[in-house]
Every structure is written in structure tokens, then in C-alpha cells.
């Protein structure tokens, strides 16, 4: 049986109660019976004495010891009497068990049978308390025994009733309940004979609860499936995002990344790590800039958006990433950063190309006139002295005419390369238009510039083999130069002066051994000013 | 019977008996066997009589306030142990008086009217107690 089962508990409780009640009631009953026996004994002794009184009177009257002994024996033979004594003027008789200090005794006066007022002696009757106690105990133990038997019978009946009317139905209900899954349409059946009982009500209540549970569970299932669908979609969105998405703690511990981030890490040949520093700064060329810009954005409660270069270069090309960092604070006040990376290298490339197209000549890949003029404007703004040299090719038109535009383009690229190679890094070499080129050199003097022109001319006038036609061609060069701010401090005039100088020697430059370099004449500048 | 009951009863002894008067208690002790001697230690022999009718029962009625049946019961109980014996019984008053006249130890009872002065002297008896209704 189950140690804390209802039946065992019930049995133990009833048994304890029965034993307790039995014990108490037998104690009380013993006290009562004892008292009652005492009273009864007193009465019976008195009655007994009534019987022997005439004999006792006569014995005392006549001083008849034999008669007196008879009286005493008659009294002592009674179970309720322990001992007796008879004292008169003429004799004194005691039975064997007579005690000097008895627990309880009754005294009777013995009178003359003929003169009732004449007292002749006393009879002392000592009560047999042991007998009384034993008798009372017997009565009490009989009671407690019957109570014990009654308790046993009642316990057995109670257990029987409890088992058949309570425990068994409960067990049946419990077993059914155990095998029952909440959320299904199954319900409990009422146990037999329990249609209207508390157990029946319990079953009804459980069924009501099951109904509610079924309703709730089906609702929750619906909700869960919706959430699962949503979660699937979110996962799809997250995992299939082209942009790497990272969830991290502010200190840089990465909590969640998507496939795109992993493939980015593989692409830039980095080990998979849990931490790449705050805001992934270790991956970038300028980690401090990354963290600083993010922190300043967060200080202004803005989402941090910045474009940063990765350390890694792919085929010598810089990878630019747009870094979008937003700070997330959860309900339990934990702070997280969500980082989205967008590869903007292509955009950057295109922008570069665009700016290149604006500033460079597409054919020769050198600075074009527009960009060149901008840089000259900058030099003038900075008041940096420089020489402006305008050059024109001789014989280019013939190459074009004989070999076609491809050959002409090839020659132009050849010349441009020579210019680019010779021009120092702080100088400007640009295609001015057609077969015209411009070179600007900072902080130079006539002598140095003449040397530069000599070298340049030497390189360019060398016969050049056309790749497309396997033929040698040769072009010449004519240069006109003006100094800023020596000749003039105005750009248009500077260009004009150089142009004029160049055209002045154009015919001469075409002849063998003729000058190929001419400087602007200041007098003419003055004239021009007045024009 | 009514007349007998109303008549006084005289207790008589031999004229020479040293006892001149007895209390009722002393008489009871003699007749019920407690003592066998007069107060002066002279032994006593109490006598009962059967006639006249009513004398014995009236005597015991006046002496111990008991009917004869109870007195007989007393004696039957006492006789069993042999401690005391009941008085000797005579047929009539005259025989009792005659016995007393001849025995100084005897003591008896008669209706008072059965005793004349002359008789007292002739018979040598004396009354030491009278019992009334």
C-alpha cells in the first residue's frame, strides 16, 4: 500500500483515535467504576452488618466469644471485606489480616439487644480495596477491550467504505486523467454511484477545465504555428540577406551572425572568431576611425552609418564596406549592437571611375584639360610659382592620315606615357586637347625647365614602332612656356602667352635643328593687357 | 386478654433474699441470661410460668418490649453455644410461688392481684419490682 495513501492514513488515524479514546475512556471508566464500587461496597458492608447485627449484639451482650467469632468470620468471608474486629467490654477479637492503620474501614456500634440505648462495643470492618480495584480494573479492561474490538471493526468498515466509495473511484479517475492528454477531445467518465457526489462534481469540474485547456491549447497552437511561420520568414530574411548582419555586445562579443557574414570572413581570409574588437574594428584599415565615428553617432542618438575600408585587399583592390550600427536596448536593459555591412566597393569603383572620367582623359589615362585647369587654379590660389608649358605635336596629322586613327591614338598614348614618366610627382601633365599637351612644373627656373624639355623632346622625337602596323613613325614637338607669376598672374593670359610663344616658333620647330622651345615675351604681355 | 394486659406484674423473690429491689435493667440481665447472680453475688434462678394465660407474654413485652416468638428465637440462638440457659418453666403461678418460697435463689413473676398480704407472709416471699403497662 502507498505509504501516504489515503487508506493507510485513514486506518492509522482511526486506529490512533480509537486507541486514544479507548485509553482515555477506560481511565475515566476505571475511576468511575472504582468510585461506584467503593460506594457499592460501603452499602453492601452496611447491608451485611444489618444481617449480622442481632448476632453481634447478642454476642456482646452475653460476652459470648464463640458467637462473636462467628460474626467476625462471617464478615471476613465476604470478598469486599479485608478484615474485621470486634471489641466489647468482655472480649476483643480480630481477624487475621486486620491492620492497625487501615486504608478504609467502617465502624459499627454494637448495642444491647434489649436496651437499644446501651452501647456494648464496636465492630470495625476494613474494606478490601485491592479487591475493589481489581474488580474495577476488570470492568474497565472489559470496556477497553470491547472498545478495541469495536475500533477494529469500525476501522475495517471505514477502510472498506473508504476504499470502495472514495479511493477506488479516485484511482480510476486519476488513471484516466493520467492517460489523458490536455488539448484532446477526450473527457473523464463519472465513477459508478458518484453522479451527484463530490467526486462526480470533481469530475465535472475537471472536464470543464479540460474543455478550457483544449480551447486554449488549440488557440496557442494556431498562434505558435503563426509564430513559427513568421520565425521561418525572419530566418529566411536574416540568413539569405546579402548583407552581413551581426548582433554583438558593446564590447565586441558576437552573439549572432548570418551566412553572408561568414562568407565575408572567408572571403577576406580571416579566422572565424567570437570577437573582432568593438564594432569589428580589427577588420578595418582604420579601427579608431570606425569606433570613433560610431561612438559619436551614438552620443547624438543616431544610427551610425559610415563607409570604411577593410584591411584586406582583394587583387590589390580596396574593399569598402558601409557599416550601419544601431544600438538595441532590450526590455531587461541589456545593450546590444546590430551591425549591417554593405559591400560598397563597386559603388566606390564606379564613383572613382566617374571622377576619373571627369578628370582624366579616357584615351591616354592622363589628366584632362578640365582637371588640369582646376589644379592650375589651385596653384594660383596658393600663389605657388610655376611654369606653364603648352606643347603641340608635329607630324601627328600625317600619322593619322596614313595609318588611321588607331595609329594616331597609339602615338598619343606613347607621348602621354613619356610625359607622365618625366613629370615629377608634384607636377602636372595633361592632355589639353587633340595633339596638344600641357606640362606644369612648380618652383622651377628657365634652365631646369629647358633641361626637362630637352629630355622630353629627345624621348618623343625617337622613331616609334606602331604595334598595330609594324611601322616606324616619328613625331616632333613644339613647346611654348610662360612663368607664373613672372609673366602674368592671370590664367587666361598665361595660357595665351604660352600659346603665342609656341605658335611663334611653330614653323621653325618643324625644320631639322630648329628651336622647339619658346618663352613668352613680357612686352607682348603688356600689349595684351592693354588690348 | 385486655384485662390481663392491663394488670401490673410483680417480681417476687424469697423473703430472705438479700436483694430488696431490682432495676428493670438488672431484671433483664437476669432473665436474658447475661448474669446468673443477684447484685450481691447471690446466685439467681429465674423462673417462667405457662399460666395464667397472657402472663408470660405480657411480662416479656413489658421487660424487653418483645413478643414471645422473638424471645424464643433469642434463646434458641443462645442455647446453641451453651453460654446461657433460658429460665425454668413452671405450670402456674402457684407452683412458681411455692418454688420461690422454698428456694432463696429463685426469682419469678406473677400478676400482682394474685398476691395477698397473707399469702406473702405465709409463703415467705417478697416483691422487689412491679412492672406496669
Image: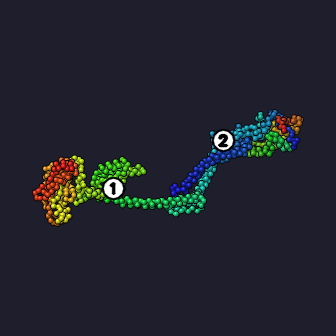
User: Which dot marks residue A341?
Assistant: 1
Relative to A175, B36 lies left or right: right
- List the residue tagged with mark 2: A105
Relative to A466, A243 lies left or right: right
User: Which dot marks residue A391?
Assistant: none
Q: Nearer the viewer, residue A47 or A76?
A: A47
* Res. A441 visible in picture: no
Residue at 22%, 50% (x, y): give it.
Answer: A491
Relative to A520, A269 lies left or right: right
Coordinates of residue A285 in the picture (x, y in percent): 28, 52
Instruction: Measure the alpha-carbon separation of dots 1 and 2.
Output: 118 Å
Q: Judging from the image, what secondary structure is the residue with disc 2 in?
A: strand
How many numbered discs sit on the rendered protein?
2
Q: Which chain is disc 2 placed on?
A: A
Seen as rendered, the residue at the extreme front is A531
Q: Which chain is disc 1 placed on?
A: A
Residue at 82%, 35% (x, y): give it.
Answer: B128
Circle 1/circle 2 CB separation < 8 Å: no
Amino acid at each position: 500500500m502507498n505509504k501516504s495513501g489515503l487508506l493507510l492514513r485513514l486506518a492509522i488515524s482511526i486506529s490512533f483515535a480509537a486507541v486514544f479514546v479507548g485509553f482515555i475512556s477506560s481511565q475515566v471508566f476505571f475511576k468511575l467504576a472504582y468510585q461506584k464500587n467503593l460506594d457499592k461496597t460501603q452499602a453492601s458492608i452496611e447491608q451485611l452488618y444489618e444481617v449480622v447485627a442481632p448476632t453481634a449484639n447478642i454476642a456482646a451482650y452475653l460476652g459470648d466469644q464463640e458467637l462473636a467469632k462467628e460474626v467476625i468470620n462471617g464478615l471476613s468471608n465476604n470478598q469486599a471485606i479485608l478484615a474485621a474486629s470486634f471489641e466489647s467490654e468482655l472480649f476483643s477479637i480480630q481477624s487475621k489480616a486486620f491492620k492497625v492503620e487501615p486504608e478504609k474501614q467502617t465502624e459499627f456500634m454494637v448495642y444491647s439487644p434489649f436496651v437499644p440505648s446501651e452501647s456494648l462495643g464496636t465492630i470495625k470492618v476494613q474494606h478490601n480495596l485491592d479487591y475493589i480495584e481489581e474488580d474495577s480494573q476488570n470492568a474497565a479492561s472489559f470496556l477497553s477491550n470491547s472498545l478495541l474490538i469495536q475500533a477494529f471493526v469500525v476501522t475495517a468498515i471505514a477502510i472498506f467504505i473508504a476504499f470502495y466509495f472514495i479511493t477506488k473511484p479516485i484511482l480510476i479517475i486519476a488513471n484516466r486523467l493520467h492517460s489523458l492528454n490536455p488539448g484532446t477531445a477526450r473527457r473523464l467518465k463519472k465513477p459508478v454511484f458518484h453522479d451527484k457526489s463530490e467526486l462526480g462534481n470533481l469530475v465535472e469540474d475537471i472536464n470543464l477545465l479540460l474543455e478550457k485547456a483544449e480551447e486554449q491549447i488549440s488557440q496557442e497552437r494556431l498562434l505558435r504555428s503563426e509564430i513559427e511561420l513568421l520565425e521561418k520568414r525572419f530566418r529566411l530574411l536574416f540568413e539569405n540577406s546579402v548583407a552581413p548582419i551581426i548582433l554583438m555586445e558593446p564590447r565586441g562579443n558576437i552573439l549572432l551572425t548570418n551566412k553572408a557574414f561568414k562568407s565575408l570572413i572567408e572571403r577576406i581570409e580571416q579566422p572565424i572568431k567570437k570577437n573582432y574588437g568593438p564594432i569589428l574594428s580589427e577588420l578595418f584599415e582604420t579601427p579608431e576611425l570606425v569606433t570613433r565615428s560610431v561612438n559619436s553617432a551614438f552620443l547624438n542618438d543616431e544610427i551610425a552609418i559610415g563607409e570604411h575600408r577593410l584591411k584586406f585587399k582583394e587583387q590589390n583592390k580596396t574593399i569598402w564596406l558601409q557599416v550601419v550600427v544601431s544600438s538595441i536596448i532590450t526590455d531587461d536593459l541589456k545593450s546590444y549592437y546590430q551591425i549591417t555591412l554593405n559591400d560598397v566597393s563597386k559603388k566606390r569603383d564606379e564613383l572613382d571611375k566617374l571622377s576619373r572620367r571627369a578628370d582624366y582623359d579616357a584615351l591616354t589615362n592622363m589628366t584632362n584639360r578640365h582637371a588640369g585647369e582646376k589644379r592650375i587654379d589651385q596653384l594660383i590660389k596658393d600663389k605657388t610659382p610655376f611654369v606653364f608649358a603648352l606643347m603641340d605635336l608635329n607630324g601627328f596629322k600625317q600619322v593619322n592620315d596614313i595609318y588611321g586613327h588607331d595609329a594616331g591614338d597609339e602615338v598619343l598614348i606613347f607621348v602621354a606615357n613619356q610625359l607622365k614618366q618625366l613629370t615629377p610627382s608634384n607636377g602636372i601633365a595633361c592632355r589639353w586637347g587633340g595633339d596638344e599637351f600641357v606640362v606644369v612644373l612648380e618652383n622651377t627656373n628657365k634652365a631646369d625647365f629647358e633641361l626637362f624639355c630637352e629630355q622630353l623632346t629627345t624621348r618623343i622625337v625617337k622613331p616609334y614602332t606602331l604595334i598595330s602596323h609594324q611601322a616606324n613613325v616619328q613625331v616632333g614637338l613644339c613647346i611654348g612656356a610662360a612663368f607664373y607669376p613672372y609673366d602674368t598672374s592671370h590664367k587666361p593670359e598665361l595660357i595665351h602667352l604660352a600659346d603665342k610663344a609656341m605658335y611663334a616658333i611653330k614653323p621653325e620647330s618643324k625644320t631639322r635643328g630648329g628651336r622647339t622651345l619658346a618663352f613668352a615675351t613680357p612686352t607682348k604681355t603688356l600689349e595684351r593687357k592693354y588690348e | 386478654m385486655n384485662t390481663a394486659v392491663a394488670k401490673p406484674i410483680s417480681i417476687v423473690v424469697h423473703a430472705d433474699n438479700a436483694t430488696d429491689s431490682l432495676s428493670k435493667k438488672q431484671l433483664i440481665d437476669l432473665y436474658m441470661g447475661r448474669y446468673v447472680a443477684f447484685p450481691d453475688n447471690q446466685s439467681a434462678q429465674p423462673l417462667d410460668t405457662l399460666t395464667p394465660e397472657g402472663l408470660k407474654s405480657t411480662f416479656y413485652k413489658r421487660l424487653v418490649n418483645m413478643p414471645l416468638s422473638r424471645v424464643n428465637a433469642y434463646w434458641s440462638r443462645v442455647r446453641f453455644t451453651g453460654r446461657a440457659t433460658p429460665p425454668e418453666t413452671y405450670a402456674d403461678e402457684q407452683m412458681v410461688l411455692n418454688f420461690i418460697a422454698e428456694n432463696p435463689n429463685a426469682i419469678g413473676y406473677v400478676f400482682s392481684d394474685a398476691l395477698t398480704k397473707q399469702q406473702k407472709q405465709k409463703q415467705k416471699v417478697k416483691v422487689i419490682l412491679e412492672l406496669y403497662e
